[in-house]
Amino acid sequence: MKTYPPIDNTVTTTTIKQPLKFLTSSQITMLDEALAELGEYGELHLVIDKGRLRFLVIQKSYDANKWNSSDL
């Protein structure tokens, strides 16, 4: 089984100097969590419907040359 270094779960806050035009703060948190879960390879796709973020599609990829049957 592939192991990854531990994620630094310390809370970091950032002040944004201008108002957000599209994402809410909870959506930003959701994106950050999804990025942290991707592992070594992967993609995030944002699905926009009627001008709003509707879905976040997470696609994990595995290196075929380093495949272990227990990696899924």
Image (tube, helix red, strand yellow):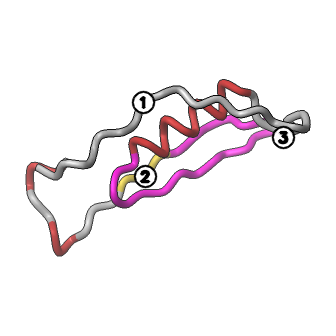
First in sequence, mark 2 or 1: give its number.
Answer: 1
Helix, strand or loop at disc 1? Answer: loop
First in sequence, mark 2 or 3: give its number.
Answer: 3
Residue occupied by mark 3: 51
Camera-nearest label, 2 or 1:
1
What distance separates the C-alpha of mark 2 from that of mark 3?
Answer: 23 Å
What residue is shown at x 21% (from left), y 71% (from top)?
64
Left or right: 22 in relation to 53: right
Nearer-the-camera pick, 4 or 41:
4
Q: How many marks?
A: 3
The image position of residue 18, as x and y in percent, is 91, 38
What distance separates the C-alpha of mark 2 from that of mark 1?
Answer: 23 Å
Q: What secondary structure characterizes most of the magenta part? A: strand
Nearer-the-camera pick, 24 or 50:
24
Helix, strand or loop at disc 3? Answer: loop
Circle 1/circle 3 CB separation < 8 Å: no
The part of the chain drawn in magenta is 38-57
Residue occupied by mark 2: 59
Q: Amino acid at mark 3?
A: Gly
Left or right: 24 in relation to 45: right
Q: Amino acid at mark 1?
A: Asn
What residue is shown at x 17% (from left), y 75% (from top)?
65
Circle 2/circle 1 CB separation < 8 Å: no
Q: Amino acid at mark 2?
A: Gln
Question: Which mark, residue 9?
Answer: 1
